[in-house]
Amino acid sequence: MKIGIPKGLLYFKYYSFIDAFFDLLGAEIITSEDTNKKILDEGIKYAVDDACLPVKVFHGHVALIKDKCDYLFIPRFIKSSEGQYICPKFCGLPEMIRSSIKDLPPIIDDPILGLDEGELWTFSKNVGKKITRNRIKIRKAFNEAIKVQKSFKGGIKDEGYKLNVALIGHPYNLYDNFINMDLIKKINDLNLGIITEEYMDEDANKKEIEQLFKKPFWSFANDYYGFASYVGRKRKVDGIIYISSFACGIDSVIIELIKNKLKDFPLLVVKIDEQTGKAGLETRLEAFSDMLERRCTNENYYSASWK
């Protein structure tokens, strides 16, 4: 059985679990290509106009893989834990794809109601039944896939740079080099080190969130606000770069919360859509880098080492 997995959205965060689970069940995994101009053009053609760039790109991945597989894997990602929900577009993604793209194979669209092992087992058990009726095999595949995911260390933690920035954004913006126009390489080329929220201590994150009047409804908001607040307040980095999709409602709230908390701490917000040009991005990054260098030199202060 061939399982088609579009290489977009939260694939960048959980692909180690997904790939390991299907592989151990004996399915053949068909992943789409890395995002490119053709995929973007297909996505723009099929997606509704007001969809954000990552959702449009996801449509393109689906369009170019749908005829190569027996099933498409597009789970209905609803929440990460009790009271912590995901962007509404993830909840309705299977319906969005079905209404926009015709002649699709069957879609595996089982809901994900949490990322703890209990909820993930319920999800994996239901998905596994579509491939095999052997419950023992499904359980073994799940246990091994959990081990693979736990051993997977994503994120970025650069060493040896005089100036360092916290890079914040949804994983599909940070790690899709086509969407972000090689942002990570461009930052490093400016001699700036990068740290991402994967290296944030969970307890420290919770303490930052507790200082808010009300805990954010969205799990991404908790992660990114807590990380930005901590590194800015503790001066663990020299600046923050936040990459955001144009018209992302969750990002618009998080960014304002960060600005309100950190006041005059250096923050560069990079908005991207299908019209964003590389030249403009490079100019803004260069200006931000120069500003950080002047600021740290004048104040004779550089970020504390990350621990």
Image (cartoon, grey):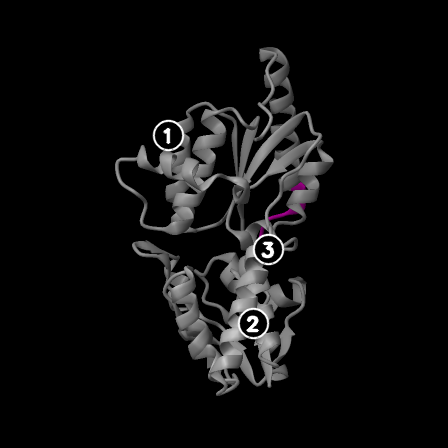
Quarter of the figure with residue 305? top right
**What residue is pinned by disc 1?**
260
What residue is shown at x 60% (from left), y 20% (from top)? 302
Answer with mark 2 or mark 3, whichever residue precedes in sequence.
2
Q: What range of the chain is rendered magenta?
A: 274-279
From mark 3 to mark 1, how far is it between C-alphas?
A: 36 Å
Q: Which of 128 and 232 is in front in this view?
A: 128
Answer with mark 3 or mark 1, whichever residue precedes in sequence.
3
> Badge 3, how many Cα within 10 Å: few under 14, some, many 20+?
few
**What residue is pinned by disc 2?**
21
**Does 58 appear above or below 306?**
below
Q: Position of residue 218 (x, y in %)?
A: 36, 51
Disc 3 element: helix
Q: Nearer the viewer, residue 116 or 252?
A: 116
What residue is shown at x 46% (from left), y 37% (from top)? 227
Of helix, strand and loop, which mostly describes the magenta segment? loop
Can see residue 8? Answer: no
Q: Which amino acid does label 2 sit on?
A: Phe
**Does 283 appear above or below 70?**
above
From mark 2 to mark 3, how far is it between C-alphas?
A: 14 Å
Location of the N terminus (image quadrant): bottom right
Q: Position of residue 213 (x, y in %)?
A: 26, 35
Answer with mark 2 or mark 1, whichever residue precedes in sequence.
2
**Does 186 appear above or below 211?**
below
Q: Residue furthest right?
A: 189
Q: Position of residue 153 (x, y in %)?
A: 60, 51
**What residue is pinned by disc 3?**
151
> Badge 2, how many Cα within 10 Å: few under 14, some, many 20+?
many
Disc 1 element: helix
Residue 243 is inside the magenta segment: no
**Does 69 appear above or below 223?**
below
